Amino acid sequence: MKDFNYYSPTQVVFGRQSEEKVAELVKKYGGTKVLVHYGGGSAKKSGLLDKMLRLLDEKGISHIELGGVVPNPLLSMVYKGIDLCRKEGVDFILAVGGGSVIDSSKAIAYGACYDGDVWDFWNGKSTPQAALPIGAVLTIPAAGSEMSDSCVITKDEGLLKRGVNSDLCRCRFAIMNPERTFTLPPYQTAAGATDIMMHTMERYFSRHQDMTLTDAIAEALLRTVMNCTLDVMHDPEDYRARAQIMWAGSLSHNNLTECGLEKDFATHRLEHELSALFGVTHGAGLAAIWPSWARYMLPRHTSRFVRFAVNVMGVENDFTSPEQTAEKGIQAFETFMHRIGMPITMKEIMGREVTDEEIEIMADKCSRAGSITIGSLEKLSKKEMIEIYRLAK
Ligand code: NZQ
Ligand code: ZN
């Protein structure tokens, strides 16, 4: 078992009435002038945004708004937010939306407390020393940003998608009302569920395989998300299923499923290049890459894939052929992805084959021109990244 330091400071307020608490929570964490940050329109359309503004008004909390965050959020929007925070003396950011809005808020929170160019944190020139406090009102369970220490931003110029990790950006509170996810289109629901599964699987497939408690939590989480996703595909207003997916989304990325293990995250790194270059939905990109990563890893880590096949995907263990059992687990994952409308190759997302030149570009960016490796189960060089992208074509 690997030593660990588990830190998860976000106050979670979960349930049907949770949004009513927003102003009280902003006050509790010191907000007097709030930037309310949101996305392309879903929060406006549903009335959630107006409700948040009204509740802040009722408690006499001054606020300004900045909407228009796009999926795979852009640095240009972050600069806008930083300028606004400085000009208006903002001391708290309220993110109303999903991972993209929360990550944009986190980046603004860093930038508002930094004298240089905020991108310095993503290109390794500097590390964050301070951030404005943030609260989240979550509308899509997926990225887990509401409890994670991670902030993923795309630099418009060169389409560089990068993550920065620091406890400073962890949300002070996360309001989660599963009813707010009823309006999610099936594709976003499925992509979100895939991302949640992948945050768990990227930790489950670890070199440290003697943490049975963490493994059991991960397996239960994965089975729950799969069952509940099928339920909400059938009935989008199934509160019980929506609630479990929502909570699983937070637990999958707040490091609970990492205790005693070592995260891999190679599939994530490969996917970030795909969504940076082509703007595809993050969860769908993960679905397209994982089966190829898994088949690449299977020969060297067969027993782990057997455990996944049997305990998560419900495959019967064929003790005479572990390889076959493991392969059946990957196939069962692919079948599930197709059932919920997710792709299992890049061609299925793009509607065309990704070219060798495009693969070279993605692998080059992912490996920083061949200077770094990714992953921990096996460390992947640029050459191996190309092989996996080719398998995922
Ligand atoms: O922009 P609006 O109009 O709000 O629409 C959004 C968006 O189009 C829509 N949506 C959200 N809630 C809705 C809704 N539509 C109807 N009803 C609702 N209740 O869903 C679309 C996707 O939203 P987005 O925030 O982009 O999704 P997600 O939470 O998956 O975030 C994706 C981003 O997070 C990054 C991803 O790479 C990507 O950039 N990640 C962040 C992580 C982190 N900070 O810890 C970890 C992840 O691995 C991931 O990399
Ligand atoms: Zn993810």
Image (spheres, grey):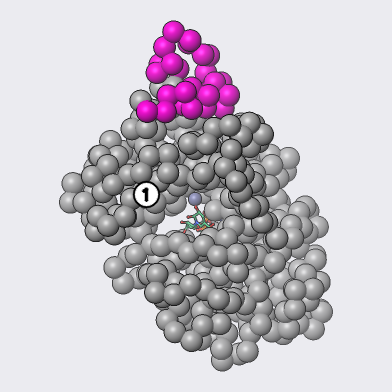
Magenta region: which residues?
Answer: 300-325
The residue closer to the viewer here, 101 or 378, is 378
**Residue 289 picture location, percent across and down:** 37, 41
**Residue 211 picture location, percent across and down:** 61, 34
> Measuring 34% from the left and 64% from the top, which residue is drawn there?
160
**Residue 27 picture location, percent across and down:** 78, 76
> Measuring 66% from the left and 82% from the top, which residue is drawn there?
91
**Residue 192 picture location, percent across and down:** 54, 47
> Measuring 53% from the left and 14% from the top, which residue is drawn there?
316
Residue 267 in view: yes
Could you classify mark 1 by the number of other residues whose Cα lies within 10 Å: few (under 14), some (14-19), or many (20 or more)?
many
On whether residue 371 falls in the magenta region, the answer is: no
> Measuring 71% from the left and 56% from the top, which residue is drawn there?
176
Asked if residue 22 is positioned above or below residue 241 in the image, the reply reads below
Asked if residue 356 is positioned above or below residue 174 in the image, the reply reads above
The quadrant of the picture occupied by the N terminus is: top right
The quadrant of the picture occupied by the C terminus is: top left
The residue closer to the viewer here, 203 or 136, is 203
113 left or right of 369 in image: right
The residue closer to the viewer here, 177 or 287, is 287
Which residue is identified by label 1?
Answer: 374
Residue 194 in view: no
Element type at mark 1: loop
Q: Residue furthest bottom?
A: 87
